[in-house]
Amino acid sequence: MEKYPNLKIITHPLISHNLSIIRDKNTPSDLFRTYLRKVCEILVFEATKNLPLKETEIETPISKTKVEKLKDNIEIYVALILRAGLIFSSSFEENVPNIKVQHLGMERDKTTKQPIHYYNKLPEKFDSDKEIYVYICDPMLATGGSAIDAIKLYVKDRNIPQKNVVFINLVCCEEGVQKIFSQFPDVHIISAAFDEKLNDDKFIVPGLGDAGDRIFNTFY
Ligand code: PRP
């Protein structure tokens, strides 16, 4: 997007079609999960386009040939913001090799709208001489509070370069995008939709409702 060079909204007829089902309030929880996963898979391929390759030689049954593989000296961290971010889990596990999955428990307080941290499966520091790539996943980017807290854990607390951090979501809006880039201008955001606004209750409009509750069918 021109205004935000590091924001990429992925457009594709299948994303539009799947989003039409995901956004519909009459879509039941099982179908909601199924269609969400379809979009997650496309986003995971887009988000991981920054992974570095190295050339190597192999032998096919016919001849020797040069091929490209992911570099060896890299480490890939997938941060799933609980609960809704869990929906990205299978797309990463099935498509990206050697990932380390790090769960971050955060829940947005119903009154203050600020994230409350309740779990964090991150080491104190990363003792690695490898180049680290981080993919932080949550279907929703609303006020940006949860995303910023998650990005901080990697960039500020553990010195991961911003350019190696990608925040992946399905639906975002100006408020959240603006807030992330005001603090972390060099991180990347990948999304399937840039929605109109937030309502007074800080829900994305038109959005898709409460992703966590719709995924896990926890309307009580
Ligand atoms: C939702 C959503 C994000 C956050 C977005 O989670 O999945 O984590 O709110 O809002 P923000 O950009 O304003 O921080 P929620 O608190 O509903 O938790 P859940 O995934 O467990 O349902």
Image (tube, helix red, strand yellow):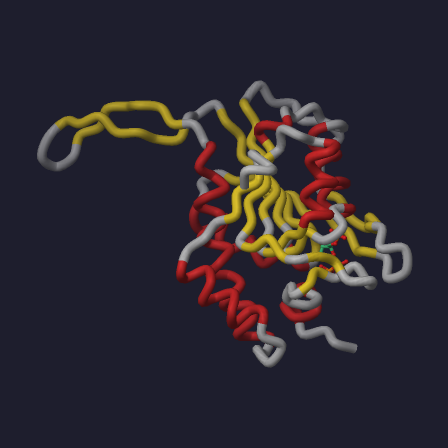
| Percent coordinates x, y for residue 110 in the rendering | 86, 62
On screen, residue 21 versus residue 4, left or right, reads left
Q: Position of residue 115 (x, y in %)?
A: 82, 50
Residue at 69% x, 23% y is 159
| Quadrant in the picture for the C terminus | bottom right
The answer to which quarter of the image holds residue 127 is top right
In screen coordinates, is 62 left or right of 195?
Answer: left
The picture quadrant for ligand 1 comes to bottom right
Please give the name of the residue rendered at 79% of the width and 59% of the height, measured from the top-left corner: 202
Q: For this rendering, which residue is in front, 206 or 150?
A: 206
Answer with the quarter of the image where residue 132 lies.
Answer: top right
Q: Please say if 145 is above or below 39.
A: above
Relative side of 3 to 43, left or right = right
Q: Position of residue 30 (x, y in %)?
A: 55, 75
Above or below, 75 against 19 in this view is: above
Q: How many marks?
A: 0
Which is nearer the eye, 143 or 107?
143
State which quarter of the image contains the N terminus: top right
Furthest-right residue in this view: 111
> Which residue is pictured at 40% across the width and 60% down the height?
13
What is the quadrant of residue 88 in the picture? bottom right
Name the residue at 26% across, 29% down: 67
Q: Is residue 36 left or right of residue 210?
A: left
Q: Outermost residue toward the front? A: 3
Answer whether residue 220 is visible to the viewer in this image. yes
Residue 145 in picture, x, y percent from top left: 78, 46
Going by the picture, which residue comes out furthest to the top? Answer: 129
The vertical placement of 55 against 31, above or below, is: above
Can residue 123 be seen?
no
